[in-house]
Image (spheres, coloured by chain):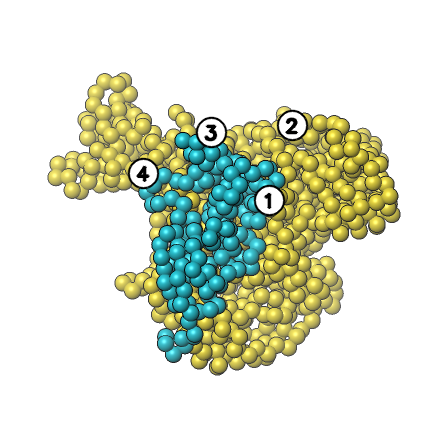
Chain colours: A cyan, B yellow
Amino acid sequence: MSEHAVQQVPIRVTVNGRELAAEVEPRLLLSDFIRHHAGLTGTHVGCEHGVCGACTVLVDGAPQRSCLVFAAQADGAEIRTVEGLAEPGAPLHPVQQAFHEEHGMQCGFCTSGFLMTTVALLEETPHPSDEQLVDALSGNLCRCTGYRNIVAAARSAERKLAEAGDE
Amino acid sequence: MSELIGRSVPRVEDERLLRGEGAYVDDLHPSGCSEAAFLRSPQAHARIVSIDVEEARSAPGVIAVLTGADLAGELEPMVFQIARVVPETVRASTGAVSRVHPMPAIPADRATYVGQPLAVVVAESRYLAEDALELIELELEPLPAVVDPEAALEPGAPLVEPEWEDNLALEYRYRRGDVDAAFEQAAVVVEEVFHSHRHVASPIETRGVVATVDPLDGTLAVSASTQTPHQLRDFLAGALRRAPETLRVRAPDVGGGFGPKGAIYPEDLVIPYLATRVGRPVKWIEDRSEHFAATTHGREQVHRIALAADADGRILAVRDSIVHNCGAYHTLGLVVPYNTLTHLIGPYDVPAVDVRLRAAITNTGVVAPYRGAGRPEAVFAMERAVTRLARAVGIDAAELRARNLIAPEAMPYATGMIYRDGTEQVYDSGDYPKLLARARALVEEEPWAERAAGRRVGVGYAAYVEGTGVGPFESAALTVLGGGRVRVATGASSQGQSHRTTLAQIAADALGVPFERIEVVGGDTAAIAAGFGTIASRSLVVAGNAVAKAAAELRAAVLDAAGSLLGAPPESLTLADGTIRPLDGDGPELPLADLAGALSPFNPRRPAGAPTELHAKAIFNPGPVTYAAGVHAAVVAVDPATGAVEILRYAVSHDCGRPVNPAIAEGQVLGGVMQGIGGALYEELVYDPDGQLRTGSFMDYLLPTAGEMPEIRLVHVDCPTPLNPLGVKGLGEGGAIGPPAAIANAVEDALADLGVVVRACPLTPDRVRALIRAGGGDGGATAGAGATEVAA
Ligand code: FES
Ligand code: FES
């Protein structure tokens, strides 16, 4: 395939605490890098135009739509994806647990994005107002649940995180 | 012995999905996988003059480029047999005529809608495939296009299918009672035109297909984001001229369906074909702009409806003349258009009916079932008309409905119509007055504080019935595995409906095996040879009862085998909690795991003649459909100055028979309601008069978000059906049926004194403003005056 090799740029990122170095095409989307190069397919792509939020990951702590960022732009960044919320075999992260208990998911395709959005919100604002909560969640689309249980899950996650913090 | 049915058992699906370990079709990437991209028609109707792919063929990373001409003779054109099906009884009662035409997977001569595939590139990656698309030189000669279905039926309209003499794909007319006399004698007649606009279902996961040829046995393995893997297998077998046994189709995790993923598409055939041709696995994942143009759309009907009533508002007759838009190909026959007929009269007792429907092909994307499939269209027309009638008679809209509902004592109630499956339409059970009363109670907090504050508040209702659990069949196969686990395989796949949980609840109860030891496999033709799929609010009814039936047989087989092992008559034994015990409690116990071990071929002391496997298979043929029903009520506030509509409360009372898992059932209703709200207020797929798609992204086609979610209240009025052993009715679609009608009725109510008549959705601010201007009222000037004639 070398005959059609295009110019590559070297990048170095940390994904869920693991350091990765790669040579990527400048046009490679961060979402494709995460899914295909890092092999973390829990981050989903629903629109590739920045509206659905399914591809949301945390880049240096802030929620980002990974379909709107080139992998090359993330050089040096610390990235967290859904796979980083709980180690395989370890108990679910409180936010994941809350989505399960409140039936905040059906097909699950939007779920990773909602989880990462909720984690970012509650890390930044541990006790959001109703307005802040709905505002944060309204950047993600879900076509299955009608959102009520997602909002309930985010509230329940807030309580779980607060309790965990108290212990 | 029912312990789990009826309980909100937490979902077993969740954990993998929450950890990001789901396997959706784009997560499958077999080694050596190549990727495909399609060149799509930029024009709605055009003759293909030439497609030059030479440069694309030699572009970097390109493996193959194929056009329609290359595929002719390789892939049979798609013929949709279901479009042909008109049961004799339907033909006799409605004179229904359906005309079918083949759809080329990729046309060689003519493009008939924007987004139709015209060529395909296979390359090392999607990036390189799309690069090569740019190098294809396509020359098209534009042909006149027709987009509007009524225009398509006018004499002299451009022909979408040149083999036909007009664009009429399907036609029927149903008549009962003396409609003309009823209209002559009526004290009140209302007549209106109502439009159901075009939607796109928009699951968050788009479509996708991955195909691989097994190097050992040549099996063509296809994973697709589909609702109907078995039907896809059979379709593929025909198109590729292969025996179905040489194909394996799987629906992996599927990220939402809502109807469109129950259709069969050109890409579903082309990608597997390419895998056989290029000798590498091939993957295609639809992008969102392709989805808007090339995945099936929903709705789009025009109703010219008239109601005749006596002075008390009792409906004497309904007349409706309907035009339905099929899009460029007629693929589904009666399915959607005929659902409209059999759901139009809904929960009302109407003596005389005359409904005529004509379906046209047009130069637009194919229209196929979308959550509700012909029912929301019917309900929008009828429930808008019923509300207009209430206003004309001068009584409250809920009261007028109450006067016309079928009484519970009248159940089972024969409507006189024939259902799509050819059987008589009979509502099996339901209490419609109670449904209405419960919904009414949920919005009766008069006076609303908003009204007191001077806002224009309106209340609107929508009542409907929904035939659910349609046949022909679903299958289930249960097998006891080592360790006493039980595998349930079914033809019904899941796109989020939680079958792994609900079907396991049903199996656990019927078998006497703990829920945790049941695993459900759906949507794999290798796990079960026959299957139908998850469409049309049918799985819980049809697959659920198939599982219950097979579980009863397996239980008998288990007790038989245990009996011969223990030397006890099987009738003296029971299976509970995964252990076989004597009914009288006197004697040894045998865990299912031990029974399976004793029967294993590895056991040198296995009893002679004992079965080597504990297995049972069942097919459930449901017979006539069972009727779910509901009443929705919306309370809205409308700002006449800006046209903004706010839903203050949304209430649903519904009957889904016996709920298997209330939390999951409620989730289905909530999701459906939100989709319906989307269609009522935000979503519309728009073509311009030339057939160009104006809404090709989520920036133009607006889905509701959490910010648009109103307060929703649900109540259940569950009337189990006598039609199936479990007593269940379907509920996947019901939530989406009511909202456009209920919200349109509420908006009109809020603006009634301004002369507003709502004839179509979505009720976007600019459309509401236009309605106010057309009504002649200057809403801005009267803001704060409050609404009149609000349902109390
Ligand atoms: S895929 Fe990135 S926002 Fe939709
Ligand atoms: S759970 Fe299916 S899109 Fe949200």
Where residue B248 appears, as percent x and y from the top left, is 37, 56
Residue B6 is labelled as 3
Residue A135 is labelled as 1
Q: Secondary structure at mark 3?
A: loop
Q: Nearer the viewer, mark 1 or mark 2?
A: 1
Task: Report, in whole angstroms, how far the alpha carbon at label 1 lies from the one at label 3.
Answer: 35 Å
Task: Report, in whole angstroms, how far the alpha carbon at label 3 lies from the one at label 2.
Answer: 21 Å
Where residue B154 appears, as percent x and y from the top left, is 74, 63
Horizontal side of B357 relative to B750 (left or right) equals left
Where residue B733 appears, as percent x and y from the top left, is 57, 42
Indicate the chain on which mark 4 is placed.
B
Quarter of the picture holding the N terminus of chain B: top left
Q: Secondary structure at mark 4?
A: strand
Where residue B194 appears, as percent x and y from the top left, is 74, 48
The residue identified by callout 4 is B486
- In the image, B41 versus B86, the foreground residue is B41
Q: Earlier in the sequence, mark 4 or mark 3?
A: 3
Residue B399 in which image quadrant: top right
Classify 10 Å Cα crowding around label 1: few (below 14), some (14-19), many (20 and above). some
The residue identified by callout 2 is B438
